[in-house]
Amino acid sequence: MTKTEITKVLRALNQFEIEIPSWGFADTGTRFGKFLQDAAAIDLDDKLADAGQVHRMTGSCPAVAVHVLWDFAEGEDPKQVVRRARKHGVRIGSINPNLFQDQCYKYGSFGNPDPAIRETALDHVYHSIDLGKAVKSDLVTLWFADGTNYPGQDSIRGRKHRFQDCLKKCYRKLAPAQTLLIEYKPFEPAFYHTDLADWGMSYVLSKNTGPRAKVLVDTGHHYQSQNIEQIVAFLLDEGMLGGFHFNDRRYADDDLTLGSIDPYQAFRIFHEIHFYAAERGEYPKIAYMIDQSHNIKPKVEAMIQTVSVAQELYAKAALVNHKSLLRLQEKNRVVEAEELLRRAFFTDVTPALETWRKRHKLPIDPLAEHRKSGYEAAAAKARSSRRKELGIVAGGSYA
């Protein structure tokens, strides 16, 4: 790499932060059950400790996303949660309400035809917004399992109207610094129609809700072969891209490690953001977040691997010469324009990553350093004993 290229990468990495999810450290599974790991986190303190370890190894993960039902004990002082996070060298990031787990949501939450259940869902989101204010989180992330499984089951337009009404009510509860991120998903668990099935639906509802409501793009929540970077480019241009949930997938929403299946796609997404920033002279405010739960990989290792790959792909995308790319595009030099991207993608950015890590007093090889530290073995020993005391056994649901 040239000195100019290394400088580009250092500048990019200095402003790159990616939030990690608390649920990525706990025992999770599928609808068939859980596969337990001795080192998996049992409670929020364990999750924050694991997140702190990832941040110490990578230097890019100061914030931890939390799920309200899974992470906040009833009656717990939110300020105590802030102190616990600080103890582990991290802070509380996005607040994630849970609108899919309780039995009352069988026919939906915000889209439910029963006004009493919609009110229950609203009360939970209001509480989540208040928790966000208490822990100084500026992001409230909404994902819905709402939809129907059979034609005629409910009014599609009626559900849209209910959603819009509920979202506006939530928006009015936000603090001035808070943003509402509205996620979409094409299917599961609703297989006839999902209320927020794509970026356009999320865009319309966000736009109608208010200027601090934005679209959240989960890279796993798309149909096969969908051009996600085109969606990103459109949302950027409209000022409606609020954030990402990064993962990878082979078939659908598989929660696979970022870059494990299609690293070029993640590179192309990052390229669109760098390209936009080059034209505008500044980077847009985007929340980069990971949404992964690993059943067979060790939890902390998988998260360190993910963050390292994200850093690498973000760095590669920063190498694209956008002035040259624009000139080639204007002249319809198709092959040369494509090769400009390919050369950046295939560049070995290891020297620049090593330089950045040395400057920030970070491990040169985060995964190797984590393994050398003995953190996993110590956590497994302590938590397996606690798990026996608590009577935790295999089985159960996703969370």
Image (cartoon, helix red, strand yellow):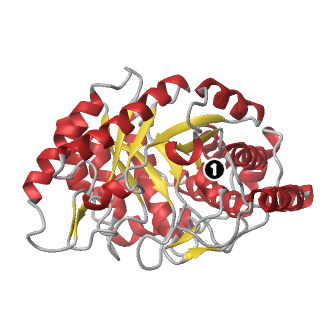
Q: Residue at x 38, y 38 (%)?
A: 124
Q: Position of residue 334 (x, y in %)?
A: 33, 69
Q: Residue at x 38, y 56 (%)?
A: 100
Q: Position of residue 244 (x, y in %)?
A: 44, 51
Query: Is residue 353 positioned above or below 209 on the image?
Result: below
Q: Depth check: 289 or 267 in front?
A: 289
Could you tell me the amino acid type at mark 1? Glu
Quarter the C terminus occupies: bottom right
Q: Residue at x 46, y 69 (%)?
A: 339
Toward the top, the furthest residue is 176
Quarter the N terminus occupies: bottom right
Residue at mark 1: 5
Direction from residue 89 to residue 191 in the image, left or right: left
Q: Quadrant of residue 150?
A: bottom left
The answer to whether residue 197 is seen in the rendering is no
Q: Quadrant of residue 120?
A: top left
Query: Is residue 269 positioned above or below 276 on the image?
Result: below
Query: Is residue 76 positioned above or below 145 on the image?
Result: above
Give neighbour class at mark 1: few <14, some 14-19, many 20+ (Cα, 10 Å): some
Direction from residue 39 to residue 396 in the image, left or right: left
Direction from residue 128 to residue 65 in the image, left or right: right
Q: Residue at x 27, y 25 (%)?
A: 172
